[in-house]
Image: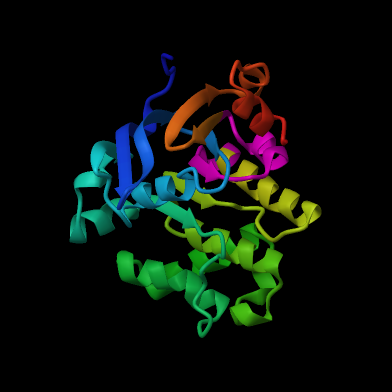
Amino acid sequence: MTESKPAAVVLDRVSKRFGSKEVLNGVSFSVPRGEAVCVLGRSGMGKSVTLRLMIGLIKPDAGEIFISGNNISRLDGTELSRARCKMGFLFQSAALFDSFTLHDNLALPLRRLTDKSNSEIEEIVDRALNQVGLAGDNHKLPGALSGGMRKRAGLARALVLEPEVLLVDEPSSGLDRITASEIDDLLLEQKALHQTTMVIVTHDVHGARRVGDRFAILDKGNLIALGTPEELENHENETVRNLVGGK
């Protein structure tokens, strides 16, 4: 498939094994700038491992991963930290520091990874919290928040560095349908207003259809389908049809 826009994310024949278990086997796909690919598959098929590889938490056994032109699979230390400044990561659990206020959770990456002044940091944090509907909650601790508010706060923290690429792990996990739809709305707004490229791992086909431009289907470590939801609805593979249909 020829991309009309340059790719912000490229996985090139990526393989990963843990002991005797092969988790990914030569997986290749790309995401054009400003588009969202939703990664679907049954549990244990390598979806979250794919995100961990993309952010450089683990290294592939073979293949290469490029994010915004950086070969993540070959970077370490300072170079990897610099490359991560172009990425945002929304963890499934939000992964907020429980002893920090929301304000301090968002300010931390700005203080550690940029040379912005205190006034600039204050402005960015306030803007990010306002964007996700938490403008009046900046002094709250994560323990005082509902699940949906924690997810919003995690998204705000992922966006404070104004990332070119946003990696999202199960955005609707643990949320009711209405709250999950609100998170989907925030992702759609981010993509529309800032042309943020997204890779979203999810079991929520309803949300994936709203946010994703294309689906990447993983099964037993292999990429078995890549295309729009409409293209995959009548795919020859039953697993693909069932996943796209929400079965």
Q: Is residue 15 left or right of residue 199?
A: left
Q: Is residue 78 left or right of residue 208?
A: left
Q: Position of residue 70 (x, y in %)?
A: 26, 42
> What's the residue at 67%, 44% (across, down)?
204
Please indicate, yes or no, whether residue 69 appears anywhere in the rendered image.
no
Quarter placement of the N terminus: top left
Pick the front one: 91 or 218: 218
Q: Quadrant of the C terminus?
A: top right
For the point 64% across and 59% down, the residue is: 132
**Location of residue 115 with respect to 158 vertically, above or below:** below
Percent from the top left, x then y, of residue 32? 44, 28
Q: Image quarter for residue 109?
A: bottom left
Closer to the camera, 121 or 218?
218
Q: Is residue 162 above or below residue 228?
A: below
Q: Residue at x 49, y 26 (%)?
A: 224
Farthest residue toward the right? 178
Q: Position of residue 203 (x, y in %)?
A: 63, 45
Is 236 situated left or right of 26 in this image? right
- Would residue 54 be seen by someone viewing this image from the given angle? yes
Residue 196 located within the stretch drawn in magenta: yes
What residue span does the magenta drawing correspond to? Answer: 192-214
Residue furthest toward the bottom?
99
From the viewer's side, name the closer residue of 210 and 114: 210
- Give the colouring mode of the picture: rainbow
Q: Quadrant of residue 84?
A: bottom left
- Quick check: is 168 in the magenta stretch? no
Residue found at x 67% / y 21%: 233
Where is residue 169 drawn, in percent x and y? 53, 52
